């Protein structure tokens, strides 16, 4: 009779995860943190490295949609194999985003709430989305570049 090793903090947290309707952002942050801690990866998880890893994983997610027609991209979920592959890449993106939030002590729920509030002001309901990549009247490309240089981020909604 074999005795299984005691479960790690990571494994206990991972097993406690339920579906989206029941799992909190904090639960996801905790499982990512436990995974990183058990592997002693904090020294590698600098904001620079995490943001770069997140971008790389986002590119891997985009590969699944590259060269598809718009309707084909909408239909990708019809294939369980494709849906699973896209889900794995999406999970990588989310895990790195959560690791970055952990590293910088950013409250994800508050950040999303504030961002959506700003987006609602910038893009009122009932107005079509801008076709110029998010630049509104009175906003120049130079202003957008200066915004990014000071940490303001991209000019696209969401």
Image (tube, rainbow, N blue to C red):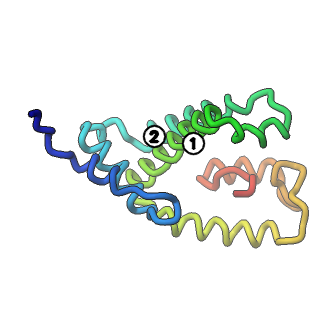
Residue 59 position within the rendered picture, expressed as x and y whole percent measured from the top left: 63, 32
Residue 75 position within the rendered picture, expressed as x and y whole percent measured from the top left: 77, 40
* Residue at mark 1: 90
Q: Secondary structure at mark 2?
A: helix
**Between 136 and 15, which is closer to the camera in this rendering?**
15
Question: Is the C terminus in the top left, top right, bottom left or bottom right quadrant?
Answer: bottom right
Residue drawn where x is 53% and y is 37% of the image: 88
Question: Residue 90 is drawn in which quadrant?
Answer: top right
The correct choice, above or below, for 56 with respect to 134 in the image is above
Q: Is residue 100 left or right of residue 72?
A: left
Viewer-side label of 2, 1: 1
Q: Is residue 74 left or right of residue 62?
A: right
Residue drawn where x is 88% and y is 56% of the image: 130
Q: Circle 1: is it few (<14), some (14-19), or many (20+) Cα within 10 Å?
A: some
Q: Circle 2: is it few (<14), some (14-19), or many (20+) Cα within 10 Å?
A: many
**Between 71 and 113, which is closer to the camera in this rendering?**
71
User: Tag 1 or tag 2, which sits nearer the N-term?
Assistant: 2
Q: Is residue 134 left or right of residue 23?
A: right
Q: CA distance from mark 2 to mark 1?
A: 15 Å
- Can you tell which mark lies on residue 141? none
Q: Secondary structure at mark 1?
A: helix
**Between 15 and 54, which is closer to the camera in this rendering?**
15
* Residue at mark 2: 50
The correct choice, above or below, for 155 with respect to 6 in the image is below
Question: Is the N terminus in the top left, top right, bottom left or bottom right quadrant?
Answer: top left
Marks 1 and 2: in contact by CB < 8 Å?
Answer: no
The correct choice, above or below, for 16 with respect to 79 in the image is below
């Amino acid at each position: 009779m074999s005795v299984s090793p005691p479960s790690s903090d990571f494994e206990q947290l991972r097993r406690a995860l339920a579906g989206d309707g029941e799992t909190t952002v904090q639960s996801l942050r905790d499982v990512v943190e436990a995974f990183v801690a058990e592997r002693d990866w904090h020294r590698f998880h600098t904001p620079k490295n995490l943001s770069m890893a997140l971008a790389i994983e986002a590119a891997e997610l985009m590969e699944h949609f590259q060269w598809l027609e718009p309707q084909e991209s909408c239909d990708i979920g019809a294939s369980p194999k494709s849906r699973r592959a896209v889900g794995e890449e999406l999970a990588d993106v989310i895990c790195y985003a959560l690791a970055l939030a952990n590293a910088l002590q950013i409250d994800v729920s508050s950040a999303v709430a504030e961002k959506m509030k700003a987006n609602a002001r910038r893009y009122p309901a009932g107005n079509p989305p801008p076709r110029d990549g998010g630049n509104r009247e009175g906003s120049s490309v130079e202003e957008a570049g200066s915004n990014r240089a000071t940490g303001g981020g991209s000019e696209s909604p969401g």
